[in-house]
Amino acid sequence: MPVAPAPSETELARRLAARTLELVDIPSQSRSEAALAAHVATVLSDGGAHVEDLGDSCVLAYARETKPRVLLAGHLDTVPAQDNLPGRIEGEHVHGLGASDMKGALAVMLELVLARAPFAALFFPREELPSSESALTPLLERSPVEADFVVVMEPTDGELHAGCLGNINATWTFHGRSGHSARPWQADNAIHRAAIGIAQLASAPSLPVSSGGLTFHEVASVTRVDGGIAMNVIPDSCTAHVNFRYGPGRTPREAEKRLEAMTGGLGELVVDGNSGSAPVALDHPLARKLIQAGELIVAPKQAWTPVAEFAAAGYPAVNFGPGATSQAHRRDESVEIAALVRAYGVLEAFGS
């Protein structure tokens, strides 16, 4: 497969925008990624790339005779649609479901492989679901990918985001005793008990955690509350959903103990899921090369991303992608075409 001539910036912008829109318009809500995985495999195969079907809608591709040792990784799935399909190109942006998180990044990955850049590209499903439904961790267990370094192309506003937070989801249940709302002293209001606990958790300040020269912030939030059966009944139970994001260096078990301490022994706390954090990999020579290639701003990843899954499997990994963090999951989601071009250019320079 001969090396294609480098496109002009105008042509590259047109190509990346068109490819992003093409991918946006193939629905791929979590658990329904098979059609997009097949499309990606066909585009790459027709373009002369080596394509491997790794099962479970996971696709690996590369264009060199020798498999590259740097892996670009991106998820195929999106959150549910919000009347934002089909997509459109308008002005300097591509609009539509997943444009920023992360079909713009998938377009960059596709075009780099088709241009024979020295990268392997891994496309995988179900990233937007709880980690218990991950396709990536089982893949790395059954079919380890040969790679010295991984660039996870999550939205980072064109910055390099190192490491990531761990993520606990828990159910916090408060028990009381039901009764008539006209005589509340004869009952024990579980919602009132929950209010005391939630107020205590809300008063806890965020905790700064330093790792690799970067500062992450550990935060706990109540994201949902359910309770009550009727307007005139004191409720005997109330449940709250708690989300706790914890920094690198704290083990999953240590994070659970920390959350237990923050809830102060009030109510009954049950951990539903716990996805580990990822270490900062800035000391890796390929991380330094990537930073230099784009003169990238470096920041902590104040979120959970698949770098944690790669790190747990022994791969040094960082986050770098064209998507805007503020655009992810929005009804009016979009990605800037110039950001696609810049990400492509940075990775092209990184690979040279």
Image (cartoon, helix red, strand yellow):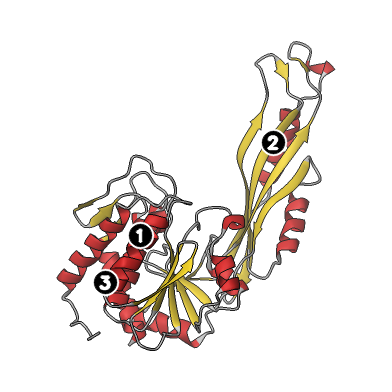
Q: Is residue 343 above or below residue 119?
A: above
Residue contact at pointers 1 and 2, CB within 8 angstroms: no
Pointer 3 or 1: first along the chain? 3
Q: Amino acid at mark 3?
A: Asp
Nearer the observer, 278 or 25: 25
Give neighbour class at mark 1: few <14, some 14-19, many 20+ (Cα, 10 Å): many
Pointer 3 or 2: first along the chain? 3
Direction right: furthest residue:
186
Label tally: 3
Measuring 59% from the left and 61% from the top, which residue is drawn there?
Answer: 217
Nearer the camera: disc 1 or disc 2: 1
Residue contact at pointers 3 and 2, CB within 8 angstroms: no
Q: Quadrant of residue 153?
A: bottom left
Nearer the camera: disc 3 or disc 1: 3
Q: Amino acid at mark 1?
A: Lys
SS of the residue under disc 2: strand
| Residue 7 visible, this angle | yes
Measuring 71% from the left and 29% from the top, which residue is drawn there?
Answer: 191
Pointer 1 or 2: first along the chain? 1
SS of the residue under disc 1: helix
Q: Is residue 171 above or below residue 232?
A: below
Residue contact at pointers 3 and 1, CB within 8 angstroms: no
On screen, residue 5 versus residue 85, left or right, reads left
Q: Which mark is residue 103?
A: 1
Q: CA distance from mark 1 to mark 2?
A: 36 Å
Residue bearing mark 2: 239
Nearer the observer, 318 or 300: 318
Residue bearing mark 3: 46
